Amino acid sequence: MSAAATSSTAEETFVLSEWIRRAIDEVDLSNLVTASPDADVVAEQDQPSQWPANIRQTMALCSDEYLLSALRVARSLAQEICEVEENFGSASAVERENNNHGDDDERSFFLPTPGTSWSERVQVHVSSSASSEFDETGNNLHFRIKGANFLPLGEPKNDAKGQSVDEDCMRRIYSLGIVLYELLSGGERPPEIEQPTGGVTSTATDGTEELSQELSETENLDLLPVDSVDGAGIVDLTAELSIFDDVIPNEYNLSNDIEGGDLFNPEIPRKRLAQSCGYKVNDVSVEPLRAKCLPVSLCDLVANMIDCADGNPSGEDSYHNMSEVRDDLQLMLDKPAIYLYDQDMGKLAITGLQFGNTLFGRNAELSTMKDAYCRSMSGSSELVIISGTSGSGKSLFGYEFGKHVLAGGGIVLSGKFDQLKQGIPFSALASAFNDYFGILLADSSPSSIAGVLASKVRASMGTDVHHLSKLIPNLATILGPETSPINRNDDCDNAQKRLQYLLCQFVEVISSTFSAPVTLFLDDLQWADAASIEAVNHLLITASIPSQEKRVFFLGCCREGEIDEGHPVWKLLSSVGKSSVGCTNIKLGLMSEHTINAMVSETLCLLPRLTRSLSEVIYHKTKGNPLFVSRLMLTLSNEGLLRHSLSRRRWEWGKEEIECRELPDDVAMFLNDSISELPEDVQSSLHVLSCFGAAASLSFINILERALQKNIRSNLDVAVTKGLLDIIGDQYRFSHDRIQEATYNMMEDGVRRLFHFTYGLSLASLSIEEGCEDILFISVNQLNLGGPVTVQDPSQSYTVAQMNLKAGKKAMEMSDFKTASTYLRHGISFMRERHWEEHYSLSLELFELEAKCAYTNGDHERVKLLFEEVLEVAQSFEDTLEVTYTCIRSLLTASYIGEALTKGLYVLNELGIVLSGDLEALLKETKSMLAEYSDEQLLSLPLMTDQTKLMAMKFLSRIQTCLHYTNPKSQPKATLHMIQYSLLHGLSGVASLGFVLYGSFLACLGDIPTGYRYVKIAIKLAEKLNARSSMSEVLLVGSQVMGYVEPLQSVTEVMVRGHEYALVEGSISNAMFILLTNIVCAYWSGKQLSLVKNTVDDTLRLMSSHSTLVWIWQTLPLYRSVLAMIGNVDDVPIILGSRSDIETEQERKMSETNVHLLKVVH
């Protein structure tokens, strides 16, 4: 048939033979030719057009263009057959009985009869323009295929009466296999079924009689290439035919036929020689296809189809229905790299079995995750928790989702918590940010993203970014030397709150720079530290506030059943559950047998139909645990039960042998067995690595080898070849956490502790010798894992305590006071019984810093215990000042204001400052002293340097706070003493607070101009001395006085600055007070009520996120007034719960503290 154009469908139609010829001619072979090194263009004689015709055809048949096109044609034909079989197979028995021709007859009307030449009845449809179905470009036949189908017969045929539906289906598979053979061979017919002269045409009968006659004659041929045989009639050709064993697949091995005696047994038919119901089909060899260097998988597929020649599958890999053929063809089209092209057997022999990062059977869960991410794209904060048993594929699921985010232009920061690395401050969180900036550092051009981000960070955060750079070393590298350190000795109210605020600002800069949500993925949350989770909690809640510009998507993985009510993650989920943060829980179960087969199929690059028998055994032994599946397959490969065959160019296995392989029921026991089979030196090195967590960098391995004077790396390389370790980037990483745990738990507890302590001492010694601060946390953490029971020499105790003190200080610099407290507690635990007498200074510093950490962490009972012990053993009054000051701050925070006042007044009395006498006389004396100084002279006074006097100023600042709540009339006395003390002994950062309170006091007395003057002096002094810890309170109090002199707009700007300073210094109380004041100003200035309501909503959410219930109570009356004026009095933000809940909580809290909270009157 010639090509015909159909305008209505805009397509061309070709008979199969014509399409094959034209498709081969249109294959572009130019990309197979390269110019010689000394020429710019390909020589004329080397052009594909000059090649011999048979070479051009062979190269074209093996090209991707032609192979994929041929598969599309075959897939279309298989699909058509499946549709016809399904349509007629679904007819009821009554319908078939009433059908004039019967079900088989109707089916034969649409499909050619098995045993006829199908290729003559195939037509290929090609669109007039490039097809969008395959998303290709080009105008040749390969890219424009729309499909293929069979020409229907003129009337139903009934040439196979008496045959079952299944046998008929098998013959159709065989006949389609012949069509596919012709497609792949370039139109050649298998030589065994060449049509005789005057053979079948598309309109003739199916040729059954001629074909049967031809096959009958063939059976009379002499099968032996010899003239005679011995008397027994037996000729032994085993030796001669064995030379083909390596090139002929097992199922075609002639030697097997001879050995079994089947070749000469007239009662047993030859393989692929079938006879049934009026026609016979010859054995069709696919060796001509292999000779054309076509992919082995395609040749095997054709062979499996031809195995159905006699109406029954004759090989274990044979097809059973047409849908299997269709699915296999589709897989080859969808994933040609896996299922179509030949494997690199040379590489496979070196690398062995390799597993990819493909997700199997998780489409529903992945869709749920993508939906949550889309919500975060629209501006909301989202939290997704993935849980499941160990080995269920949680980590892979998270990392694969990260690829989806990156592909869409998103930002992914990923980190992993480690059970043995909990001593590293913000371990996973800091690692996530640091790794991300490490990637940005790779682009060193001036216009790089890192440079743009650095500029925005400096503009937005100023010198405060120093606190983050201590946590994120790569950020410090990006910012360069311009990031100067700030005063670390200032009295920060709460360093952890400060870090949380700065982290939020930082994420906002990143998100706005890339105009995308920041996706934070933290793995193994069951080992998360509290400080990191608190930071994540604050980040999510603040990002959920509509007025905030940051967008955050948090993804976490944790083991099922390992998060209890006391775990930080439990508190995180409880917190976000009360907010507007979207929360999604995804549980990953074990894999089904079908999913495991898909995994095994892709891993072995074999079609799922071929791996089903192996997958059944693996599923039965592993119960669907993905980790168990992968480890079992590796073990089977190492043992040779799963092996690659060079002759078949594919993986093969012994099902019966694998079924007999005894395995433990638990994956942990299986891993123990695998590790125990390794050489002892390899096991020893794995034990060393397991003591340091799930991964270690190459540089650290080198340090460890020097410290332990032991060869480790070469042994780890052996473990890599066994699949127990992976080398990812510059790290050795256990292939799974369970492998690390299995290795670690193989050692007894006492042995592990001794190893930890030994490794810690060796690393600490090396750190001191080489000045390597980077391994400080690692070495001290190892010492602490060993514990005091492993100390043998008493002098080691104090060495370890000093190391813990050093690590605690560094953790405090990084704003991780929970980790710092852990180090300091360990340091105290290593001290001997007489440590106060033998190492007084070390003991005092450990207790002072541990008290600060306990205060920051809200452990007020711990602060009290430490204070009492120091007070009992202190050698001087001055030695108690630091811990007493911390104790007073703790009491104030816990609302024990009376006790705090008592302790503070006692300290001031001991320092010679007595808050008694007449207030008017004290005020007159202060005014007289100040009259001698101009503004410039006051600002130029010398600085206070005496540490005891600096502590006295700090105590005075806390005493005035106590007096504000307990005896407001006496509060100015503390303020006036601060002024006089500063004039006598010098200025300090705390002095700015004294001056602003003095100005406020004068304004209350009616002297607003003078009060305003000292407010301005206080602000200038705080800026000059960089008194950041006092700045927020200075601006807070000063704005109340400035409101009487300056426009309201400028006062609002001052309050905004004060709010930022308060958050930067972790002074949440001041920050919330400023927000409340700002709302009051907006309300009374006549701002639109709907805008005021939105501002109050955001403010209440912030207050709730910081658990500042006091400020929520004081905001609610104003909020109710706004709602009443709008007309919606019952509206309360969801984050606060019902009004009755709020009022009940208020009454409870007030009864607990029993403190009268005074309203601000300024």
Image: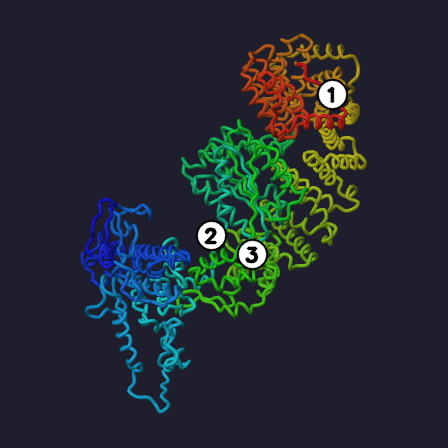
Q: CA distance from mark 2 to mark 3?
A: 15 Å
The answer to whether residue 1042 is left or right of residue 791 is left
Residue 39, percent across and down? 22, 54
Residue 357, percent across and down? 47, 52
Q: Residue furthest right?
A: 872
Numbered label tally:
3
Q: CA distance from mark 3 to mark 1?
A: 62 Å
Mark 2 or 3, nearer chain start? 2
Q: CA distance from mark 1 to mark 2?
A: 63 Å
Q: Residue at x 57, y 47 (%)?
A: 587
Quadrant in the rendering for residue 259: bottom left
Quadrant in the rendering for residue 281: bottom left
Relative height, residue 369 to residue 201 (above, below): above
The answer to whether residue 168 is left or right of residue 389 is left
Residue 479, percent across and down? 49, 35
In this rendered view, identify the residue nearer to me: 197 or 949: 197
Relative height, residue 602 to residue 1057 (above, below): below
* Label 2 SS: loop
Q: Nearer the viewer, mark 3 or mark 1?
A: 3
> Which residue matches tag 3?
625
The answer to whether residue 113 is left or right of residue 762 is left
Q: Nearer the viewer, mark 1 or mark 2?
A: 2
Query: Looking at numbered disc 3 in the image, what kind of residue is underneath it?
Result: Asn
Q: Residue furthest bottom?
A: 231
Mark 3 or 1, nearer chain start? 3
